[in-house]
Amino acid sequence: MRRHSLVVFVPEEIEINRLPVGNISIPVIAASREGDGFVTSVSVSAFGRTCEATTASPLTALHLRPEEVRAGLDRGDLETTNLISEHGAFQPLELDVHGIPMDDGTGSFATIEVRAIVSGREAMEIIRVPLQVTSLPNVPGWYGGDGHVHTVWSPDVVLLPISQRARHARDNGFGFIIIADHEDGIGRKWGMSGGYCDQCRAAEDEYGLPVLPGVEIAVANGGHCLAYHMKETAGTVPSNRGFDSRRLLAQIDGHNRPLSYGIAAHPYERREKWTDWSVRNLAGLEIINRSRRARPEAVSKWFELLNRGLARTLKTGSFTVGLANSDCHNLQEPGGRGFTWIRPGQREYARETATSGPLTRESVWSAIRSGRAVASGSKDLGFFTLNGAGIGETVTAYPGSTLALALEHHPSAGRRCRKITVFSGDGRQTVLTPGRPGMPLRLETRCPRSSTFYLAKFDFTGHRRHRDSEVWTNPVFVRVAG
Ligand SMILES: [Zn+2]
Ligand SMILES: [Zn+2]
């Protein structure tokens, strides 16, 4: 039996966010370093149970370093995905763990074993993946989800249908999920019968949570733009690299006016950097993308945009919203590194439906657009009110009067908040030591002479250091009267 002639790609870790746990699904991708052959069996074991699939999937030699393949699969790299589709084997596995008692916060391992015949000889590879059971914070009025998820509709994804993403979201207690595949994989099938929007709708009906069709469009002068709340009955959406940022945002706004809007995806990603910050109608930007922490350049740009737009925000209520999304492609799961919490307004609850509970598609699109949202690296939640107003709202106050903030944090099981920082629009910071989860922490400050905003950052820590993460709220705005 030879080891190391096979390379096996699985998620770095598996997170389950709902108790009791029913099924654990794990995508397994296998490739051969050199020599041709075929995979004979793939198995996964955890909690004393095993699921095994016997196959005869062909393998051909993949002459590429495994680290490069892993990075390409994570990032969604077309060349790597094509190589894996041509040379590798893909096996989604489902392990049934119904009835096994598990505590919230349980950490364990899943063992994945792949056997193959390579160059006529038996080969095997075994991988252990950390597995974490962590139920999501349950706070009335707040719903968590992922606003940037890829499926097989993207040319750089292998075999992950919309329905599988929707099921993952449902099984892990998400409130919503936004499918945001690359435009070039959708093209004329956007609004077509049985096409992209139809498949989102079908997954929504099947799994009972909003499954919203978004799209990621490459900007001609640099960057990727997420287009949200687009017209589902339209034939197409604006095409990749067809427009510079100014024209693309105008196209997006016009697609389903006044509802549709554009978000700068991963604005500081080295290869796909957003270049034109002079655009006025950018509805938001991802301050966290495929990471547990915000990118400092994205945060300082965000503060700059919030300040630049302050006068308009005080007039119209609209501002550039900060978001956290996973941008998951092949191995990462939705929400794993980037999760957005929303708090839909009262008005939106009125349109409750039987299929999707209190959340409707409109309420999700609108909560994000109006910034009633919190950007979280690892599904923990933190938020505050200011003189009773919630995230994304505006209050009016007199200079010198007291502004009363009440901050709350809600970690996922097994995690804790170690620091809270309150920022004002001019960059001033107040650092607080968090109290108990769910207990409001009060902070009083003097209302300044000119209008501004406040927002909070929560630092969370896990039992493993690499799981430290940040939560950034959107702002509460203060209109100074007099
Ligand atoms: Zn992108
Ligand atoms: Zn993406």
Image (cartoon, rainbow, N blue to C red):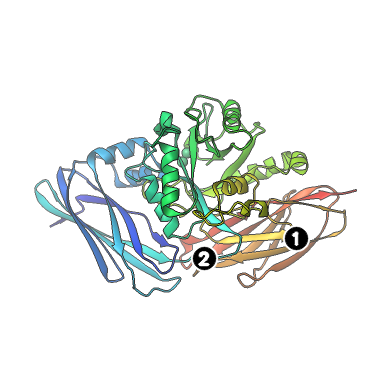
Q: Determine whether the beta carbon of the residue marked 2 sits less than 8 angstroms from the nearest atom of ligand 2.
A: no
Q: Residue furthest left?
A: 120
Residue 409, can we see it?
Answer: yes
Q: Residues within 10 Å of mark 2 (few under 14, many from 20)?
A: many
User: 41 and 390: which one is in front?
Assistant: 390
Kindly report which numbered mark, 2 or 1, lies closer to the viewer in this rendering: 1
As drawn, is 384 to the left or to the right of 353? right
Mark number, residue 6: none
Q: Determine whether the beta carbon of the residue marked 1 sits less than 8 angstroms from the nearest atom of ligand 2.
A: no
State the SS at label 1. loop
Looking at the image, tell me whether mark 2 or mark 1 is earlier in sequence order: 1
Q: Residue at x 56, y 26 (%)?
A: 244
What kind of residue is marked 2?
Answer: Ser
Residue 295, can we see it?
Answer: no
In the rendered image, residue 345, in percent from the top left (x then y), is placed at 66, 53
| 480 vs 246: above or below | below
What kind of residue is marked 1?
Answer: Gly
Q: Residue furthest right?
A: 482
Q: Residue at x 87, y 49 (%)?
A: 481
The residue labelled by disc 1 is 388
The residue labelled by disc 2 is 412
